[in-house]
Amino acid sequence: MSEPDSDSEPELTPELDDDAMAQFPVPTFDDLPEDLQGRIVEETERAGFTPNVFSAFAYKPSHFRAFFEYHDALVEDTALEREEIEMIVVAVSGVNHCYYCNVAHGALVRIYADDPTLADQLIANYRTADIDDAHRTMLDVAVKLTERPMEVEPADLEALREAGFSEEAIWDIGAVTAYYNLSNRMATFAEMRPNDEFHTLRR
């Protein structure tokens, strides 16, 4: 590996904000296991700041590893478009009133959908958002699984099939919904706070 040029930009140093969450102490970066440090450095360089969810989940390294490994599988091995994943996250987070995920994933909707207003529409009321019928069906099922899981029935999966989703995509809709219900609840429980940067991304 060649040495970096002297003119190259310096690497961003991760900072784990003390106010990333209110209910548990945020660990010090230098005290973290090496693999967590490496992942946080990657995310900091990618985003330009250290997303507070990484600072918060670093509180328990084994949970950090499992949480982000599943996240990576959901976004890398999927039949859904990334903007569809983020639409599910924001609609689910909206009905769960998850401040962290509404703000952080609202920014990702703006980025992946290349739409400055869609995230706000989905958070407020996905039923009136400017989306097509297939995506409205997708979000109907995701929100039903979030709010009334005992009422989910084969007809809901059939509605997704009729809307054009493959069997793998239908599985992925359920998996993303379930994962972000977990994420929402932990973010709320720990009182995670979104980074200021998320509020203004792609505004």
Image (cartoon, grey):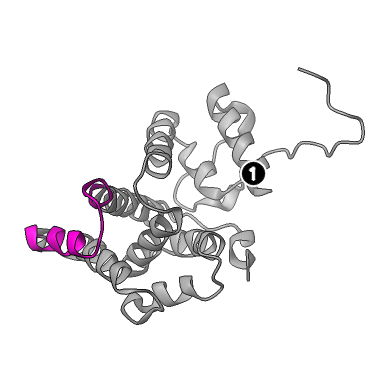
Residue placed under numbered mark 1 in the picture? 46
In depth, the one of 48 and 112 nearer the eye is 112
What residue is drawn where x is 25% and y is 45%? 168
* Image side of residue 181 versus residue 56, left or right: left
Was residue 168 drawn as part of the magenta stretch in this picture? Answer: yes
Say whether residue 78 is visible. yes
Single out the residue that lies furthest toward the top: 1
In the displayed structure image, the side of residue 53 where residue 148 appears, left or right: left
- The extreme bottom residue here reads 128
Position of residue 80 measured from the top left corner of the image (x, y, whole percent): 36, 51
Q: Amino acid at mark 1?
A: Arg
> Can you say whether 20 is above or below 27 in the image?
below
Q: Main secondary structure of the magenta part?
A: helix
Residue 194's x, y, as percent?
Answer: 54, 58
In the image, is residue 155 above or below residue 6?
Answer: below
Q: Which residues are magenta?
A: 153-171
Looking at this view, is 119 or 49 the one in front? 119
Report x, y in % for residue 179: 31, 48
Looking at this view, is 154 or 166 the one in front? Answer: 166
Whether residue 15 can be seen here: no
Please tell me whether mark 1 sits on a helix, a strand or a loop: helix
Q: Indicate left or right for 95 with 167 as reference.
A: right
Q: Residue at x 38, y 74 (%)?
A: 131
Q: Which image quarter is the C terminus in?
A: bottom right
Taking the spot 56% from the left edge, 66% from the top edge, the residue there is 114
Residue 36 placed where, x, y %? 54, 29
The N terminus sits in image quarter: top right
Q: Residue at x 40, y 73 (%)?
A: 122
Q: Is residue 183 magenta?
A: no
Snapshot quadrant of residue 13: top right
Q: Dot 1 surroundings within 10 Å: few (below 14), some, or many (20 or more)?
A: few
Is residue 113 or residue 197 the one in the foreground?
113
